[in-house]
Structure formats: structure tokens, C-alpha cells
Image (cartoon, rainbow, N blue to C red):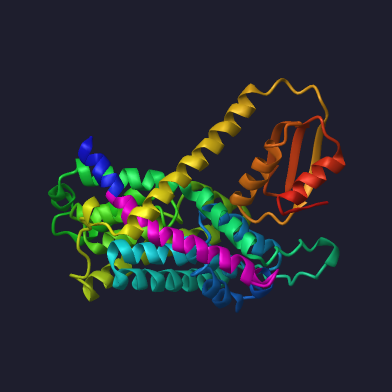
Amino acid sequence: MSLFLQSTWAITLELAPWLLLGAIIAGVLHVALPAGFVKRAFVGRRGVLTAVALGVPLPLCSCGVIPAGLGLKKDGASDGAAVGFLISTPQTGVDSVLVSASFLGWPFALFKLAAAGITGLVGGWLTDAVTDAEPVVPTPDSSAVAPAPPRTVGAAWTHSIEVLRSIWKWLLFGVLLSAFITTVMPPSWLASIGGDNHLIALGMALLISIPLYVCATASVPIAAALVAGGLPAGAALVFLMAGPATNLATLGAVYRTLGRRALSVYLGTIVIGSVALAYAFDALFPLSITAPHHHVHEASLLAQATGALLVGMMVWFASEDVRAWMGRRNAAAPTSASLTVAVEGMTCQGCVRKLTRVLGEDERVQSVTVDLEPGSATVDGNLDADALAALVRSAGYEPR
């Protein structure tokens, strides 16, 4: 147990500075991009390149990329633009690149960045080639335009916190699983299974990654632990490409919205592309990655401070979730009126959690249900429609 706790803390120290920096950059990007720019840019087949170019650095994890990517299709983007965005975006991002460089080195991080772009372009172009649907350019409707987010430091900071809040559970899971792999599995175990057969090693990484629903940042410690356990560096690349993009929620959403052909291209591009690029990376950089073995006493003051801050934030997020769960559990049977309001401005599950938290903290509210699609909030409690609308606006969204 002592070795497990030491490994957990060492991994946290390695992760924390880059994760927090990435969250800050995510907040800056959130307020810097013009309102509506993303959806206007992904129009037509040539929008695949634009979608991938913006999706690769965009700090959206699986929870945010599903509604964002499929929302592009609903707004008139081609199937290829939507698939290219869905493939490239969850694989990487500003925070993921920084954390990957910290754990696995800059050659790996930059190659992973290029791999996300390549697979996104190939998947998007192939999708446009096998699907017959032509995009319809949406007609602007000023009455339906969501309000632009405030461009302030406070808005950027709030978004940074929401980014961390949206992934903290999977981040914790990734750190703990990484520590478990490092502590329990002998370094030679995975290497002995993979042996000298590169394809078996990459196949193992693919099988491990598919059932894990983790984001690109949270999966980096797991990938590093796999390399430390004896798998080649290409196996980490396979894990980091397939893990964030091949969970059942995303596959089901692609199938329902874009159809079987698009889903086949989506899944095939990720599986075949990750294995092929892993072979290429191991051929180009066979000795570029070493197993990360860091000790607590060697950590810098910055790492110690950011590590403590990250742990404190996780405790804060956990306590909020527990309080919300206890509030729902102890709520009396709803005898008051149930109100539903349409909400505009929500783009991901982080927005859903934020609005749920704001509404649930009001003492007049007994229960809350917030849906991302089509965008609505339903509350049971002792408040009227005007009071509900005011609470929605206080969370930064617009009631309709």
C-alpha cells in the first residue's frame, strides 16, 4: 500500500503543472474565439480541413466533443467535417500535449499531435467519399443565436475550472490505474506477453483502450505505465489515440446521427490508423521514451504546489458531487409545481453540470434535470418561471 501511495503521488506531481496550465489555456481559448466561429467554419466538404485544424488543439474531451461535433452536422456541416472533428479532437488538445510531453517526451507529444490531424483528415475525407448526403448551409436566424460568452478574466477562469471539473473523475481513475499498473505488475510481465511480436503488443494496447472511457489527458499516465511495464512506445500511441475516441457513447452517437457507413469509417480509421502510426513512430523513434520513475523528494517546489492544488480541487469537486447527491436523495416527494425552460448556450456536459449545480444550490429547488439536447432544464420546487429564468441567466446561459 505504501508503494502504491508513493506511486500515486509521484504521478500526480508529474501531471499537475501541465494539467493546470492546459486548463488556463482552455479558458483563454474559450473567451478568445469569436461567438459562432466554430459552427460557421465547418460548412461543406472543404470544412474537413478547417474542422481538423481547429479540433486538434481544441481542449474538448469526450463529454464535450460529442454534442459539439454532432451539432456541426445539424447546423449544416458535411458528414466528413463532423467525423474529422470527432476523430481528431478527443485524441489531443493543449492540456493533453503538455501532459504527454511531461510523461513521454516532446517527440512523442508532437507525433501524437500529428497523428490526430492525419487520422482526422483521412477519416473526414473517406466519410465524404462513402456518404451521399450533401451539407445544407444553415440560414442565420438572429432570434435563435445564443448569447456570446463574456470576454473577461472571470469567464476564462470559470471555464478553466469547469474543464477540470468535467474530467476529474476520469483523471483520478487514470492516476490510480497508472499507479496500480506500476505497483502490481512486474516490469517484465507485459513485455513477456507481447514478446518480440510488435503486432501483439499493439493489439493488447488496443484491447485495453477500447473499454476505458477516459479523456486524452487522463489517459496519459496509464499509457506511460504501460510503456514502463514493457510495451513499446507505439503501444502508448495506440492507447492514447483509441482510448478517448472509441467508447460506446461516442460510437452510438455517430451511428444514430451519421449512419452505419460513417461509423465504419470512423472506427476503421482510428483502429487501422493508430496501429499504422504506432509502427511508424517506433521505426522513427525507437529509443525516445524511457519509463517515468520520479520520486517525491526530487519534485520541484512548483510540482509540489500544483500537486497539492490539484488534490485540493479534486476534494472540492468530490464534496460538491456528494452534496448534490445527498440533496437529491433527501429531497421530499415533489408536491410543488414542475417547471421546464428551454436553455441556449450549453455546449457540453460541463455546461450541464454547471447549470445543474447552480439550480440545485437554490433552497427553493427540490430536484433538477438538465438535458444538453435539445437544451432544457426542469426543476421541482417552490419558484415561478421568472425566478427560474433568473437562475439560468446567473449560470451564464439564456432561457427561452
| Residue 368 screen position, x and y as percent | 70, 35
Dominant SS of magenta comes to helix
Snapshot quadrant of residue 259: bottom right
State the residue at coordinates (16%, 53%): 191
Which of these two is toward me, 197 or 307?
A: 307
Which of these two is toward me, 52 or 146?
A: 146
Q: Does the magenta run of residues contain 211? A: no
Which of these two is toward me, 363 or 29?
A: 363
| Residue 5 screen position, x and y as percent | 27, 40
| Residue 221 screen position, x and y as percent | 32, 53
Which of these two is toward me, 200 or 329?
A: 329
Snapshot quadrant of residue 357: top right
- Which segment did they paint magenta? 10-38
State the residue at coordinates (70%, 20%): 332
Q: Can residue 198 be seen in this view?
A: yes
Q: Is residue 71 left or right of residue 53?
A: right
| Residue 138 screen position, x and y as percent | 76, 69
Q: Does the magenta run of residues contain 36? A: yes
